[in-house]
Image (tube, grey):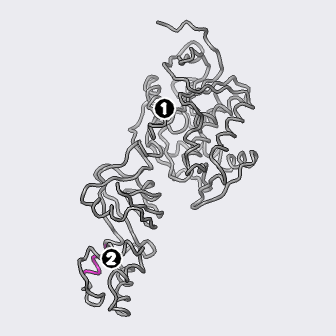
Amino acid sequence: MPDRRRMEQVDVIVLGAGAAGLMAGIEAARRGRRVLVVDHAVAAGEKIRISGGGRCNFTNLNIAVDRFLGRNPRFALSALKRFTQWDFIARMDCAGIAWHEKTLGQLFCDGSAKQVVAMLLDDLAAAGGMLRLNTAVQGVAQAMGGYEVQLSSGPVRAQALIVATGGKSIPKMGATGLGYQIAAQFGLSVTETRPALVPFTFGPQDLEWIAPLAGLALPVRVVCGQGHFDEAMLMTHRGLSGPAMLQISSYWREGAAIAVNLAPQFAASIGGVLADLERSKSQNGRAGLGRALAQIVPARLAEHFAGQLSTQKPLAEIPRADLQRLAEMLQNWQLRPVGTEGYRTAEVTLGGVDTDGLDGRTMQSKAHKGLYFVGEVVDITGWLGGYNFQWAWSSGWAAGQAA
């Protein structure tokens, strides 16, 4: 039966009170539009709150379109250029939120990520926008002059509908595929979605080798397909994690191998490691292999590798062929993950609403006036390190200027 409760009227309704949705709501409200931002969660900006270990890696100094993935990454260029990392930094400064650069251009709050959420909520309220939490979306339909949204609180009609519902990552926080369903309902294509920025899992044979080193972190160079990163890797009881693995997971596909250089301080060939081992052999041949390897990799890993040769011989008695085989493994460790930890721990969702159906300047559907998609629900995914937040700010800002 149709909902006979009184129809609420606004100019813009935003589905999702995360980074992109709040930004879109703020900008539309600042233009004098009557804005309602709704979310099924009991608190706004939960992903912001937990990000960066509670300090929110809110953007990156090195924003560039080649650090985003999707069927057409260049789609992001217009929004990223029109609302830049410097624009968001200016808002942080204006709000008095202290921040610092950590590594590789990553910017974090000095204090709590809750400060960023509070800033956004204050800006939305100051602009006259309304926020309604703990409110479920029960249906969306095109209506005369706009869109009608059935909410658990009653029906709402708006001239413009901004979908900022995010992806499927971290379902325990309420992530759903609602945005993809809305896109499909209105005839927009959705590209394949998959977990991204996520740890790898391995079969018993590899895990038997990795698990004893759980807790060990070290700098590596990892390569898979067109992706390559020089960052830290963390060994765990379940597999491999850390920034390097999270980054390369966006480039990995089932069945593919990843190559890990455990001694990235040397050139990307076995020559450097082998030469170092042979130098140790000539200078201190009585030492054990583990001691020599500890000059190249962490001592715990060195002893583990030395154990793989099953020899107690001093370094001087180890054949060059064995040293070469070890050097090859150190600089080109080939691993074939069986999978990832999935959406449960994935930081973002790769894929989403196909950008071919959207206007890159406004984020509006090309086929449906007044229908916008922003943030993670779109087929634009950034690297680890603040890139996805910047896409949320930029795409939300772009839609807010037009809706």
* The magenta segment: 321-328
Horizontal side of residue 130 vs 333, given as left or right: right
* Residue behind mark 2: 327
Cα–Cα span, label 1 and label 2 = 50 Å
Between 73 and 349, the residue placed more toward the observer is: 349
Residue 168: which disc?
A: none
Between 178 and 286, the residue placed more toward the observer is: 286
Q: Secondary structure at mark 1?
A: helix
Quadrant of the rendering where the C terminus is positioned = top right
Q: Amino acid under label 1?
A: Gly
Residue drawn at (40%, 39%) of the image: 193
Residue drawn at (68%, 39%) of the image: 118
Horizontal side of residue 385 vs 225, given as left or right: right
Question: Which residue is farthest bottom?
Answer: 283
Relative image position of residue 353 (x, y in whole percent): 46, 34
**Image quarter for residue 189?**
top left
Residue drawn at (34%, 88%) of the image: 287
Relative image position of residue 79 (x, y in whole percent): 60, 41
* Residue behind mark 1: 357
Earlier residue among tags 1 and 2: 2
